[in-house]
Image: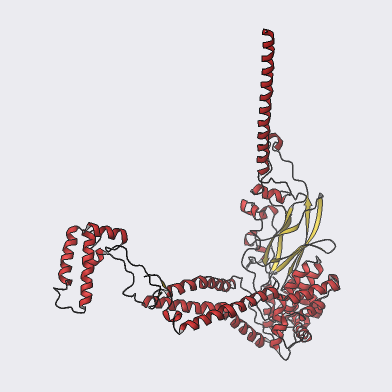
């Protein structure tokens, strides 16, 4: 009769391994994600450390401390911490756990006899004789620390080991089954203690299962699905995106002003969850107070509102790009950096100097308006322009101006990978070679030949592989903004008549040229050349000629660092090949899966599909040839019959 009872892990020999395995499957990926988030914050160029402190610096520091604490004690980090604590506890439990006496053990006759695996028959008999005298139940008088049952069991094991090495039949069992007694009993159990399944623990386990699968799991899934439906891919609330979209349609993009954009931000749905007690008018008042650099009764509310603005405006920027109006994109970016630098909307033209640490309203009346002019002034005159309190504050502001990341374009052009010209109806890439350095540096000119890149197979397959490389650009010098913000640019390609062609495309990474010697001594070897590429969504014009495009680089965090270029696109037919015509050698079109096929598609040329149709045509030709051959054979046999009949008539 079979035993239907289950065997449970009463001694905790198995279940720790099972739990440890399940925990590792979840814990290791979670740890890697947490580590990547931590290290990604470190991969950036050091920013200039300004000594200027705004009036609300204490409140800003409180907010930053709160933000760091919340970023440290995230759900992921808490899970990783306690997960590794549990992991260490399970490892400790496994190491101190002693195996049960009835557990499965490998039978090793050499170990039982105290012999090496190379022992001879003589050594086996000698060892067995000595151990028999020592452990034979009839000859053991002093048991010492052993009981008689242990001595008897030991003697039985020694005898089995000796026979497993000397008796042929028993040795065969040992070789075949791993034990001299033949096949051993195998038990299968449940890796859980008995009390969890049977007895008082059973209702508890069932209740936990019901709570987890009936309450906890549906709640998490519902919350996750709700968050996906609630926010767009750009991280803004869907109600906020819908509001901005409707306002653009109602007012038309060209009529939307900077003030309107600030008003749209104040009506964002994000603030309903962040600060539910505040109305859109309250939020608008806080935003204007920040732009005017005025203190309010509750500075933490103002700081909380301001910290969320760049993310909302980034969502607006993505929505506005669908309307193909560059001027609207420009206004959104200008409002974004005005919020980061605390510059009034009505004074955007003075933002280049007003954004410097310690600058006051004196810059609005100054004749000097550019950073490049300010850094050349004596300290006393710079103090008058900026309206700073003392010489130390003036020097800090000027040093901050010298550390602004200025882009210098070394070359810009449109190119089709693998082609010397831009053929009609081709996939075109905008390629900009540039350097990032201090406004105090003068960058030497480069020749086109020195900036040409070798078109390797890897680069031809993925032309954007060397674009936007290097560390993240440094954090912005923004003493009034509570959250660290990386500087970056947005590239916009437009055609005459304020028509957006492509973009905005983010430029977020690059190597900064740190020049410490005099500008007149700077050479090309001192310059770190960066590359930015943008694959245009449109094909090149179908007509030959030169077409001018406006390429603008807008800085999203600083004033005065924008760049505007006129880049011509010369559309021409490829030069005639000096090689023999393809018809002479019957060279087929490049296949679509090959590198040549990829290049041909970029140039708008034809590529061949897989040769399934050709195989079918060949089969049809073979079938037709078989039919023709059979028909010819029939005609030949008919002619032979006619000749034979004529000969028979003549004989008659």
**Coordinates of residue 649 in the picture (x, y in percent):** 69, 10
Q: Is residue 262 above or below residue 104?
A: below
Above or below, comparing residue 147 to residue 519 in the picture: below
**Visible residue check, residue 476:** no
Please state which of residues 534 and 18 is positioned toward the viewer in this rendering: 18
Instruction: Count the numbered circles shown.
Output: 0
Rendered image quadrant of residue 330 = bottom right
Q: Quadrant of the N terminus?
A: bottom left
Residue 235 placement, left or right of 35: right
Please state the horizontal and vertical placement of residue 104, each as a whole percent of the image.
33, 69
Residue 542: give x, y in percent of width and height.
Answer: 80, 50
Q: Nearer the viewer, residue 602 or 78?
A: 78
- Residue at x 42% of width, y 75% of height: 91
The residue lying furthest to the bottom in this view is 297
Is 422 positioned to the left or the right of 452 in the image?
A: right
Q: Quadrant of residue 169?
A: bottom left
Q: Is residue 338 above or below residue 596?
A: below
If the image is split into quadrants, where does the C terminus sit?
Answer: top right
Residue 398 position within the rendered picture, expressed as x and y whole percent measured from the top left:
69, 76
Locate residue 485: give its quadrant. bottom right
Residue 157, compared with residue 70, is above or below; it is: above
Say which residue appears at 71% left-offset and 72% top-offset: 232
């Amino acid at each position: 009769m079979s035993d239907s009872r289950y065997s449970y892990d009463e001694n905790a020999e198995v279940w720790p391994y099972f739990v440890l395995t399940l925990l590792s499957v979840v814990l290791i990926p979670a740890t890697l994600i947490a580590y990547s988030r931590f290290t990604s914050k470190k991969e950036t160029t050091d920013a200039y450390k300004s000594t200027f402190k705004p009036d609300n610096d204490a409140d800003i520091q409180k907010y930053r401390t709160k933000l760091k604490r919340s970023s440290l004690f995230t759900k992921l980090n808490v899970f990783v911490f306690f997960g590794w604590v549990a992991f260490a506890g399970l490892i400790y439990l496994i190491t101190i756990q002693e195996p049960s006496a009835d557990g499965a053990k490998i039978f090793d006759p050499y170990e039982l006899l105290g012999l090496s695996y190379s022992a001879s028959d003589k050594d086996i008999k000698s060892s067995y004789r000595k151990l028999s005298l020592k452990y034979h139940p009839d000859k053991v008088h002093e048991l010492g620390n052993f009981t008689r049952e242990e001595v008897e069991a030991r003697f039985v094991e020694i005898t089995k080991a000796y026979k497993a090495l000397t008796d042929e039949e028993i040795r065969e069992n040992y070789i075949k089954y791993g034990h001299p007694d033949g096949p051993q009993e195998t038990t299968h159990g449940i890796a859980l203690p008995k009390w969890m399944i049977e007895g008082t623990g059973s209702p508890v386990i069932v209740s936990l299962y019901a709570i987890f699968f009936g309450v906890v799991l549906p709640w998490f899934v519902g919350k996750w699905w709700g968050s996906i439906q609630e926010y767009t891919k750009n991280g803004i609330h869907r109600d906020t995106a819908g509001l901005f979209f409707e306002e653009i349609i109602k007012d038309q993009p060209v009529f939307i002003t900077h003030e309107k954009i600030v008003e749209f931000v104040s009506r964002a749905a994000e603030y309903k969850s962040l600060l539910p007690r505040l109305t859109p008018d309250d939020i608008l008042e806080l935003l204007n107070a920040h732009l005017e650099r005025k203190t309010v009764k509750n500075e933490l509310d103002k700081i909380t509102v301001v910290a969320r603005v760049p993310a909302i405006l980034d969502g607006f920027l993505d929505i506005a790009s669908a309307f193909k109006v560059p001027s609207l994109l420009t206004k959104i970016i200008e409002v974004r950096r005005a919020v980061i630098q605390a510059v009034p909307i009505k004074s955007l033209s003075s933002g280049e100097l007003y954004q410097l640490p310690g600058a006051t309203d004196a810059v609005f009346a100054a004749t000097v308006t550019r950073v490049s002019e300010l850094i050349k002034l004596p300290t006393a005159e710079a103090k008058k322009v900026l309206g700073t309190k003392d010489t130390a504050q003036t020097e800090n502001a000027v040093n901050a101006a010298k550390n602004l990341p200025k882009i210098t374009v070394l070359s810009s052009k449109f190119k089709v990978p693998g082609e010397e010209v831009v053929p009609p109806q081709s996939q075109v890439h905008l390629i900009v070679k540039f350097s990032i350095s201090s406004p105090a540096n003068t960058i030497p000119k480069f020749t086109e030949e020195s900036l040409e890149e070798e078109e390797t197979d890897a680069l031809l397959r993925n032309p954007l592989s060397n674009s936007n490389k290097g560390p993240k650009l440094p954090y912005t010098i923004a003493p009034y903004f509570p959250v660290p913000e990386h500087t970056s640019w947005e590239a916009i390609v437009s055609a005459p008549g304020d028509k957006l062609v492509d973009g905005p495309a983010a430029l977020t990474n690059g190597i900064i040229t740190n020049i410490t010697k005099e500008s007149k001594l700077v050479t090309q070897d001192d310059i770190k050349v960066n590359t930015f590429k943008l694959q245009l969504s449109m094909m090149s014009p179908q007509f030959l000629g030169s077409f001018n495009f406006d390429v603008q680089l807008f800085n999203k965090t600083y004033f005065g660092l924008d760049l505007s270029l006129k880049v011509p696109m010369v559309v021409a037919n490829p030069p005639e090949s000096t090689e023999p015509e393809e018809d002479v050698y019957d060279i087929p079109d490049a296949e679509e899966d090959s590198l040549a096929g990829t290049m041909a598609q970029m140039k708008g040329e034809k590529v061949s599909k897989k040769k399934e149709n050709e195989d079918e045509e060949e089969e049809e030709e073979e079938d037709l040839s078989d039919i023709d051959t059979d028909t010819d054979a029939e005609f030949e046999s008919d002619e032979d019959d006619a000749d034979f009949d004529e000969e028979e008539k003549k004989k008659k």
